[in-house]
Image (tube, grey):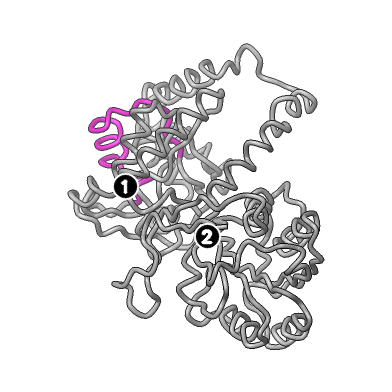
Amino acid sequence: VRSFGSDPRAVAGLVAAQVKGYQRAGVAATSKHFPGHGDTAVDSHYGLPTITHTPAQWAELDAPPFEAAIAAGIDSIMTAHIVVPALDPSEDPATLSRPILTGILRERLGYDGVVVTDSLGMEGVRTKYGDDRVPVLALKAGVDQLLNPPKLDVAWNAVVRAVREGELTEDRLDESILRILRLKAKLGLFRQPYTTRAGVERVVGTAAHRAHADRIAEATTTLLLNEDGFLPLSPDTHGSVLVVGADPASPSGTTGPPTAVLATALRELGFTATALSTGITPTAARIEEAVAAAAGKDVVVVGTYNVSASSPQRTLVDRLVATGVPVVTIAIRNPYDIARISGQRATLAAYSWTDVELRAAVRVMAGRARPRGRLPVPVQSARNPAEVLYPVGHGLSYTR
């Protein structure tokens, strides 16, 4: 859900399109996280990841999206709290690395826009240096904006002290200030720096915006599996629906947890739908409750979320399948869940659990929109990663 896909060239094209789309609309776009965060095994919120790519691998896999963003005129690039020894043998995180931010990003790639750090409150950037050194080292590396220092007074005083002691020069700070001022001027923030709530509502989230978002979500919803043409559902033949599954924390602005959103969307299309949240790690008691609730239903819809080898979500699906009631699964985050569950009649990939994607998935499931999405990544076998179950570009359509 945080990547356009697995093909660097395809991703580069999508990055360029998104940058141009945002910035034509007057929104400063930010490309993240430089020099490439796509192959980490550690979450930089909690530790310091290391990328072992060689320079050649970095140029082939990580660089193309950033090169495309720069060519498209990207306004801002965010740094990564990761170590890439092949690019900087000091093993400093990229956020604090002059060879990476100045040597590669500024000089080799020719980028002269704003460079912003990822949050300085994340553990990845705090592992090696203290909160008083991180802001200074980031500025020395070539950063323009320091995002979210955990203690603003510590960061401020450290930078002031570094200037007074000659470690940082005023000229170096002026370079960053000028980049930020240029961006603000480009966005018209000096001519009209403030707006009102009414002004926002006239421009953002309009009916036209929401309709466009619906069309985008419908076009990306991907039908991965459809045994014997089970979908689309009809209220006449599968009118009674139980919706169960994961309910991860919903982003701001959503109308409720995913199971409730799915059930509401089904009811609006004429189905009789009830929601039962079973969670990301359903307990045995909750699974039994879902099995009991499935009795007499025409279909069960299960929202899955990052199903692992040991996830009780697998048990939930298995037990529901064993009831004999047809099961439809919707992957509401990553599309890889289908590799770890079986027995369902159909599977959709929604790629997100916000209202717009969930409601689009329901319209596709009910035949109100045709499935047109295609996988941006390969789905590999859970038992044998060398076996690709569903390749890049896979996506079924309805034949009726």
Amino acid residing under circle 1 = Pro
The residue sitting at 38% across, 27% down in the picture is: 72
Asked if the residue at tag 1 contacts the one at tag 2, i.e. Cβ–Cβ closer than 8 Å, the answer is: no
Question: Residue 338 location, x and y as percent?
Answer: 49, 71
Quarter of the rendering occupied by the C terminus:
bottom right
- Which region of the structure is painted magenta? 93-116
Q: Position of residue 260 (x, y in %)?
A: 76, 62
Instruction: Write down the quadrant of residue 291 in the picture.
Output: bottom right
Residue name at image x 70 percent, y 20 percent? 194
Mark 2: few/some/many CA within 10 Å (<14, 14-19, 20+): many
Relative horizontal placement of residue 83, taking residue 237 as reference (left or right): left
> Where residue 8 is drawn, which disc sits there?
1
Callout 1 crowding tier (Cα within 10 Å): few <14, some 14–19, many ≥20: some
Is residue 111 rendered magenta in the image?
yes
Q: Give the residue furthest to the front.
A: 400
Labels 2 and 1: the sequence-earlier one? 1
The answer to whether residue 192 is above or below residue 288 is above
Which amino acid, mark 2?
Leu
Side of 386 where 76 appears, left or right: right
Numbered label attached to residue 223: 2
Considering the numbered disc 2 on the image, is that residue within a helix, a strand or a loop? strand
Give residue 335's position: percent from left, percent from top.
49, 63
User: Quick check: is 334 in the magenta stretch?
Assistant: no
Q: Residue at x 55, y 19 (%)?
A: 187
Q: Secondary structure at mark 1?
A: helix
> Which quadrant of the view contains residue 387?
bottom left
- Tell me the CA gap for discs 2 and 1: 24 Å
> Considering depth in this image, is 314 or 165 the residue closer to the camera?
314
Q: Where residue 311 appears, x then y in whole percent?
A: 55, 79
